[in-house]
Image (tube, grey):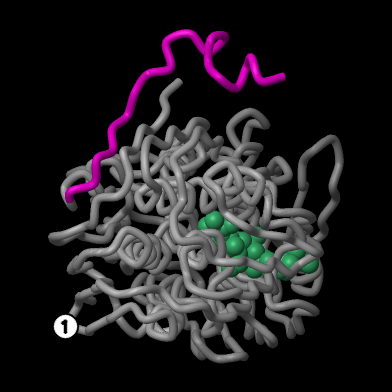
Amino acid sequence: MTKYVIHGGRPLHGEVEISGAKNAAVAILPGALLVNGVCRIENVPNISDVTLILGIMENLGAKIRFINPTTVEVDSTSVYKQTVPYELGRHIRASYYLIGALLGRFGKAAVPLPGGCDLGDRPIDQHLKGFNAMGGRTDVEGGFVFASAPADARLKGASVYFDVVSVGATMNLMLAAALADGMTVLENVAKEPHIVDLANFLNSMGADVRGAGTDVIKIRGVKSLRGGVYSIIPDQIEAGTYMTAVAAAGGEVRISNVIPKHLDCITAKLLEMGVEVEEDGDAVIVRRTGKLRRTNVKTLPYPGFPTDMQPQVAAVLCLAEGTSMLTEGIWDNRYRYVDEFRRLGAKITVDGKVAVIEGVKQLTGAPMSACDLRAGAAMIVAGLAANGVTEIDQVHYIERGYQNIVEKLAKLGADIHEETIKNPDEDWRSSAG
Ligand code: EPU
């Protein structure tokens, strides 16, 4: 077990390079199961969620070969089974993409109900509704989703109108429809950058997907997909997290390997708060020298402010002059970090989906426990700005989605390192009751 130890209060300076997008990678890699050939996928983030997905694909018979730490070759010609073992699949949310991919290619799939961060109720009814509309049959039994195509083993193109805008359901249906018989029309779809990235990946392997990035996606099924080379987009949320780190700790950092357009929703809020953000080709330069101003933030589907940046922006608002209002528009329960922030002296009250944050002049370091991926990242952001020592445990959550976060921040001048928790029984939390 490890923890991160931060001596806060040092401004950040220098350059940080953003890795490939987690939420694109965890859909594109399963997408390689649709291809009867070899896909070379570049800019793959080196994070534990990717390791888990690749481990599952290997278990299904795919051959996985790393060319370098961020380029992987997936050969799906040898896939021979369509059942994901419970122990492998249950820990990761994105295992649901294996349903769409296996169902699309082989006409059947058995996948454990997905796990992932606890953000409140996380149903997958819209995914199942879509598969059923395509002539599939889905049953949930014994912790597994069992899905099968009609007897001739090919799903049929269909029209699906989603009741809610869902990233997962949109991408899962794109995967299922790529090899289906006929045209699938998906309406009221999500428009996140990773939706467009999955469409581009599928098209570069020979699929016919149009409209990704708008409200309607049309997929004309093709008979087979061929292998090829594809490079995953940079991670919007990782970039946003470093932007908030600079906003909170102060300093000036060039954040490179980004698509600035994807960051507009985050940039707009930081500008309102008095942070300077400058576009420079495929980089943004973020600078904060003065005081932070209050603002209100509401999370919404893209191009709205991303829910996956809500805890990190909360960390910055804790230090802004005045009272800010934060509204969570996607998840029922994404404020589990608030109690931990209070240990630093943050003044936050939560009522349902709304958090009211009264800015304080200074946070003071304290021990905290990462309760999910983005909450953990936000604790780092807060710890970098706080006076004194912050220790964060349960960092396995953070490692699900951030490649080398400790090294990247240390390179920017942060005083942060990893420590082994030698005897967890003697750790502060175990004696706290
Ligand atoms: N929803 C339903 N039924 C469904 C699917 C979703 O009611 O069948 C609801 C959810 O309960 C939620 C809303 O629709 O209220 C949006 O959920 P969505 O399906 O978009 O979320 P997801 O696919 O489970 C992905 C990301 C999350 C991110 C959300 C929203 C992955 C693996 N996860 O989750 O990322 O918060 O989209 O953008 O792509 C993270 O990276 O930290 C993370 C949690």
Residue 324 position within the rendered picture, expressed as x and y whole percent measured from the top left: 60, 75
User: Considering only vertical position in the picture, is 303 above or below 54?
Assistant: below
Q: Is residue 79 something one can see in this rendering?
A: no
Q: Magenta region: which residues?
A: 413-433
Residue most toward the left?
Answer: 14
Residue 213 position within the rendered picture, expressed as x and y whole percent measured from the top left: 50, 86
Residue at (27, 56) in percent of width and height: 40
The quarter holding residue 132 reads bottom right
On the image, numbered disc 1 is attached to which residue? 281
As helix, strand or loop, the secondary structure at mark 1 comes to: loop
User: Considering only vertical position in the picture, is 267 above or below 86?
Assistant: below
Quadrant into which the N terminus falls: top left
User: Considering only vertical position in the picture, is 57 above or below 265?
Assistant: above
Q: Nearer the viewer, residue 43 or 185?
A: 43
Q: Is residue 8 something one can see in this rendering?
A: yes
The quarter holding residue 335 reads bottom right
Residue at (31, 54) in percent of width and height: 44
Rendering quadrant holding ligand 1? bottom right
Residue 172 position within the rendered picture, expressed as x and y whole percent measured from the top left: 61, 65
- Which amino acid type is marked by label 1? Gly
Please tell me whether residue 76 belongs to the stretch shown in magenta. Answer: no
Please tell me whether residue 419 belongs to the stretch shown in magenta. Answer: yes
Residue most toward the front?
Answer: 361
Q: Going by the image, does 320 lie left or right of 384?
A: right
The quarter holding residue 203 reads bottom left
Residue at (44, 76) in percent of width and height: 193
